[in-house]
Image (cartoon, rainbow, N blue to C red):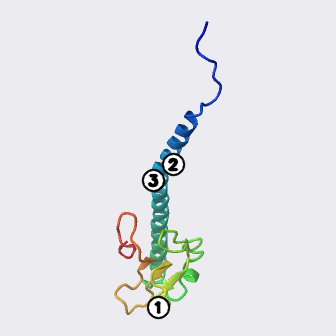
Amino acid sequence: MNTLKNKKGFGAWEIPIAVVLIILLLGLSIPKFNSLIRQSKEAQTKYSLTRMRNAITAYYGEHQSQYPQGDVAKALVPNYIEKIPQVVAPGAEPSSEVYTTQTIKGNEGRGGWYYVDDPSYSTYGVLRVNIDTPTYAGENWQDL
């Protein structure tokens, strides 16, 4: 006679153990997943920063060593870049707004781009990400 019973499904004590294991695995993986999402958003913004700077450099080369002034989007789109990309890094709402030396007052660190369009500034022609919080690696967005 076979003393083993033919079991189907989980027993009463196996279900809580399985639930605890699933919760434990989720608890370990969600923070890592959130970290990867943040890093991918920052990488996208860094890539967009490079594209924008390349568009400004192309404009500079074709306009007798003059950087765009005033409405940067109008100066660059569509001849140098198809559209102004969004800044999607954590620390600010996604925005493709380009603030200039004339429009930045009160908008520091709120997202989007910051462009120095005033020739009297030593940073004339410089484009930066308009976010105050550091990157995941601890870098300052203004230093990139």
Q: Which residue matches tag 3?
A: 32
Dot 1, how many residues are within 10 Å of its Cα: few (below 14), some (14-19), or many (20+)? few
What is the quadrant of the C terminus in the image? Answer: bottom left
The answer to which of marks 1 and 3 sits earlier in the sequence is: 3
On the image, the x and y values in percent for residue 133 come to 41, 74
Where the N terminus falls, by quadrant?
Answer: top right
- Amino acid type at circle 3 is Lys
Q: What residue type is labelled 2?
A: Leu
> In the rendered image, which quarter is residue 131 located in?
bottom left
* Residues at marks 1 and 3 touching, judged by CB atoms closer than 8 Å: no
> Up-down: is 13 above or below 37?
above
- The image shows residue 109 at horizontal and vertical percentages of 45, 80
In percent of width and height, residue 107 lies at 49, 86
- Badge 2: few (under 14), some or many (20 or more) residues near its Cα, within 10 Å? few
Q: Is mark 1 on a helix, strand or loop?
A: loop
Q: Mark 1 points at which residue?
A: 105
Q: Residue at x 62, y 17 (%)?
A: 5
Residue 57 shown left or right of residue 11 in the figure? left
Residue assigned mark 2: 26
Amino acid type shown at disc 1: Lys
Question: Which residue is found at the position 55% from the left and 34% from the top?
Answer: 13
Query: Mark 1 against mark 3, which lies toward the viewer?
Result: 3
Q: Does residue 46 sit above or below 13 in this rendering? A: below
SS category of the residue bearing label 3: helix
Residue 34 against residue 71 in the figure, above or below:
above
Count of numbered marks? 3
Question: Which element is circle 2 on?
Answer: helix
Q: Marks 2 and 1: which is nearer the front? A: 2
